[in-house]
Image (tube, coloured by chain):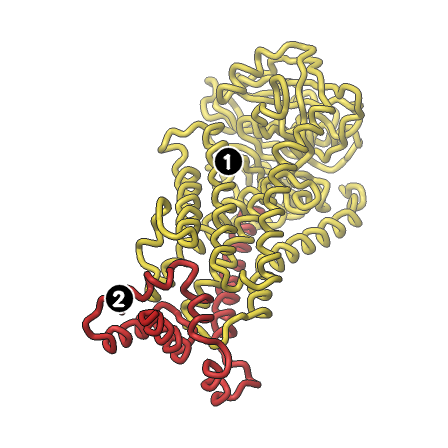
Amino acid sequence: MRHLIVDRIVWLLAAAWLGAVLLFGWAATRQPPDVPASAERAEPAAGPTGESLFGQHCARCHTLAEAAAGLRESPDLEAEAAALREFLRRHYGPSAEGNALIVNHLVESLAR
Amino acid sequence: MAGPAAPGSLCRVSLLLRGIFWFGLYVALTLLPLAVALWERPWEAPRPVLVEISVAVGLLALPLMVFQFALVTRLAASSRPFGSDALIQFHARMGVVALAAVLVHPLLLAGHGVGIAAWNPFGGPWLLQSGAIALWAAVAISVTSIFRRPLRLGYEAWQLLHLVFAIVLVAAMAAHILAVRGYSGQPLMHGLVLAYSGLAVLLLLRYRVVRPLLLWRRPWTLVENRDVGGSTRLLRLRPVGHAGFAFEPGQFAWLATGTSPLWSEQHPISMASAAEGEGDTLEFGIKALGDWSGQVVPALQPGARLWVDGPFGAFTPERKPAQGYVLIAGGIGISPMRSILKTLREREDARPVLLFYAAWDRSRMAFIDELEALQAQLNFVIIPVLESPPTGWPGERGYVTAEVLRRHLPRQYRRFQFFVCGPVPMMDALEKILVELGVPAAAVQTERFDMV
């Protein structure tokens, strides 16, 4: 009755993979133990720039002009920038600080 | 009556170890992308957990789909421990798991800016378009497989569609993962995705080109094609320019007729001849059930060229010790039983064998005269079970039920091996009945060729 054994193995594997996926979710969102929270917060200023973060997270699908179009056309730049930061948060941007850097980079691009 | 000492116990251990190895390798390789992703972890700060879970599901889906090829492309080394029918069933179940993974991946991203537009395979950035193509290819594979009969899709057309969709799916999946350039932007993951894609290509080339070419160089010729009753033809083949192959009684091979195995469809057919004592010839029992078996096979003339890819399958008494055998056959399920019986006769095996042979009436029982003659040469009894017996029939009638089995099984039947081959409803029913009768589940072997 190998087909019954096969069915059981499939259920077991599916459960194991579900566990592996959840474990991955937990492990990938865990702060590395050797990075203090303060160092993490300081990282965007010391490391990546808005331009590099935009290149890493946004440029695959959006040009700079496209991404900044909303800011350019909005009568209230501050409100639009806040909305963009919120969008990036939902759109799995790098971090709150990283999102702010990206938005600043877009705002700066308007002046060029 | 004790039989020969457990034949091939070393072989059984070797098969078990090989099974553990291949299964372990399968699990390890499906999880490898997740381990590599965690190892390389390119993000400066953690991303939302649903995003990471979605990515993990996507990274799991790729190896799942790639190894779907490995399960059904007749890799003898990996199929021998499990049996090809078990691998095909595993392939079908895993297809559903892989489809679930492919669907869950974008759904989990829906709350993170990846909307319904990402499901459009005809437009948008390549990053999203490739993912959408993979998704719809997975849906198409599942729909055409699960609903092949309601869709009135012929087996050959389905096989072609299945292959084309599978190629599109794996290619689009790999393209999508590489286009995301998240985890796959890292060198090790990038290489791993390319390696898995390359493996899929190699498996496909081996299955569709290399293996048929090798088969082409090892043709067989038809020696005899005769009617053996029950709308069944017996084909007797002899190898041409090579030594043929050894097999275990009850196994099957893929048979191709036509001008070349490169483009001829292949059919899984059980060997009906003894595994020993018949030289290098092979016999196959083929019942007229469709276009190929009903029209092409009866028209084959002696001298015709055929190609035989085998042996495959684990429906064989060779792998487990037994004090006796109970064979239960319906329809063309008698073919592997004939192979088992003739092999036992060649070995002068003295263990008891019972054959419950179910059919509508005697005229539909293939090989019946020959099997009855075997009763004088083996410790063997046939119990015909007829649905439409003639008037005055003294034997069993109806189906092979628990009562029929109880009337004939010897007292020590729980130490026997049971082999069941026939229509799927019959096999399903008998599996339940045998367990109810106290037969250990591990002692019940079935052979299922109902692929889709």
Question: Where residue B388 sits: x, y (%)?
Answer: 45, 22
What is the chain identity of the residue bearing mark 1? B
**Residue B383 visible, this angle:** no
Which quadrant is home to the N terminus of chain B? top right
Q: Chain B is drawn in which colour?
A: yellow
The structure residue drawn at horizontal position 80% and vertical position 42%, both measured from the top left corner, is: B4
Residue holding disc 2: A70
Of residues B188 and B166, the one nearer the viewer is: B188
State the red chain.
Answer: A
Indicate the amino acid at tag 1: Asp
Q: Is residue B186 left or right of residue B304?
A: left
Of residues B351 and B31, the one nearer the viewer is: B31
The structure residue drawn at horizontal position 67% and vertical position 16%, both measured from the top left corner, is: B305
Dot 2 alpha-carbon crowd within 10 angstroms: few under 14, some 14 to 19, many 20 or more: some
Q: In this view, does B56 lie above or below B394?
A: below
What is the chain identity of the residue bearing mark 2? A
Q: In this view, does A1 lie above or below A88?
A: above
Question: Where residue A11 sits: x, y (%)?
Answer: 50, 57
Q: Is residue A13 above or below residue B264?
A: below
The structure residue drawn at horizontal position 68% and vertical position 22%, both measured from the top left corner, is: B283
- Residue lying at the far left of the rendered structure: A75
Q: How far apart are marks 1 and 2 (CA)?
A: 57 Å
Q: Is mark 1 on a helix, strand or loop?
A: loop
Residue holding disc 1: B450
